[in-house]
Image: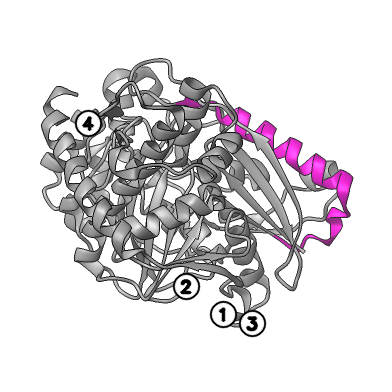
Amino acid sequence: MYLGIDLGTSGLKAILMSGTGDISHSVTEPLSVSRPKTLWSEQNPEDWWLALDSAMRSLGEQTDLTQIQAIGLSGQMHGATLLDADGQILRPAILWNDGRCASQCEQIEREVPKAREITGNIVMPGFTAPKLLWVKQNEPECFDKIAKVLLPKDYLRYRLSGDFAADMSDAAGTAWLNVETRTWDDALLNACGLTEAQMPTLFEGCQVTGMLSEELAESWGMKGVPIVAGAGDNAAGAIGVGLVESGQAMLSLGTSGVYFAVSDGFSSNPDSAVHSFCHALPNKWHLMSVVLSAANCLQWFADSIAKQPLTELLQQLEQTDIDEASTPYFLPYLSGERTPHNNPNAQGVFFGMTHETTNLHLLHAVMEGVSFAFKDGATALHQAAGVPNSITLIGGGSRSSYWRQLLSDVLDLPLECREGGEVGPALGAARLAMLSQKTELTLLDVCPVPPLKEIHQPNIQRNALFNKRYETFRKLYEQLQDLF
């Protein structure tokens, strides 16, 4: 049995996977985000730990945890978790969707002119490096105490084993990693006033980084077991649906939205804000476009506007004949945007409402707007890597058949819906844990593509309609971007 832990933004999930790859148990603990100022997004790392402890105790009540053979970790990327020399938290972690440090991004790129060449990416406000430069410039007393900078899941690793370690896929999102050589870059660290000594040790995703402490093993009713490096949430999600070979891709409809394509070599398109990161497997890379607000746009609409459960709204929408040509437009930039705009100041907008506009019209507009944002990112990614051979849908939003078909029609691409796609990163983390122990098995043995449930083929007529509406969507952003 293998334990997969995924530290998300809105919750922590822990799953148990059998030696045959089946998920036997799953527990989710909720998390909340603090937004103390405009553009800020923070969490207390202690809340992550309390969520993990609660999840483990819940699993222990359901089954025998002594059967766990290894632990894999996955989590939200880019977060800046700062520890002092005693391993104590110095301040709340600054998260991936925090947009406060745009000027620091510009400063890093001025000081390291080859930054995009080294990292394969624009230095963006969501990345870890500019967050640390912001702390240096705005909270110098805190900065001077920093002994280690950890990514969110790697703080959990530290609490589990006492080790300071990170995997390549997560480290690639810091803007301190040379993504082609898979090593920390001194010039980029120096631009933030840091050294390699303050960084965690780097590992490939299926390598063991340490052992679960004896105290925790006893407290949770476990044995001392290996902990593997794991992966950032997107790379782990890809492994969870068997994306391990070049030509495979996925669309993840989670809190954020990700279009992820595997590559055997390093390539990039940073000027269009496409991410080029290491995969969680040796000698593998991936390209990725990111929509900062995806499924959480729907949840925001349900909670703040419609004030109805989202599941009820989706059921009503699927049973209603909507005139898609006359629905309002929605710009889904509730947290700014990454690909292709790299604009932390972009904001959400409804456009084109009338007296006839209902909540269902607006819900459709939100889903369409997020789909158009995916189309923006897909276009930029395809310019760097071409169109993949297959695209799998994962994430909580993929449970909606209505949205799956809408995405296929907007993108004009077939999309595959597979069993277990909503588990995503936690399953990928468990698979990496298994890979570390079962060296006699092949990558495809451990990371099979899940059974196919449905293929959504694009509808020609709807695609023609959405192409026209997409042009209006793009013009709206162009007209409004100077007003944000």
Tell me the mark number nearer the camera, choosing from 4 and 1.
Answer: 1
- Crowding at label 2, few (<14), some or many (≥20) Cα neighbours within 10 Å? many
SS assignment at label 4: helix
Give how far apart the Cα atoms at labels 2 and 3 are: 15 Å
**Tag 3, which secondary structure?**
loop
Helix or strand or loop: what does disc 1 sit on? helix
- Colour treatment of the image: one colour
Label 4 neighbourhood size at 10 Å, few (<14), some (14-19), many (20+)? Answer: some
Q: Which residue is identified by label 4?
A: 102
Classed neighbour count for the residue bearing mark 1: other residues with Cα under 10 Å, few (<14), some (14–19), many (≥20): few
Mark 2 or 4, nearer chain start = 4
Q: Is residue 135 left or right of residue 5?
A: left
> Which disc is residue 244 wearing?
2
Q: Secondary structure at mark 2?
A: loop
- Left or right: residue 156 versus residue 367 is right
Give the amino acid type for the residue marked by disc 1 in the picture: Leu
Rendering coords of residue 473 (x, y %): 21, 41
Query: Marks 2 and 4, Cα distance to the nearest angstrom?
Result: 34 Å
Q: CA distance from mark 3 to mark 4?
A: 45 Å
Q: Which residue is mark 3?
A: 441
- Going by the image, does 210 lie left or right of 33? right
- Tell me the CA gap for discs 1 and 3: 8 Å
**Nearer to the camera, 71 or 144:** 71
Question: Which quadrant does the C terminus fall into?
Answer: top left
Is 46 colored magenta in this rendering? yes
User: Start and end of the magenta stretch?
Assistant: 42-70
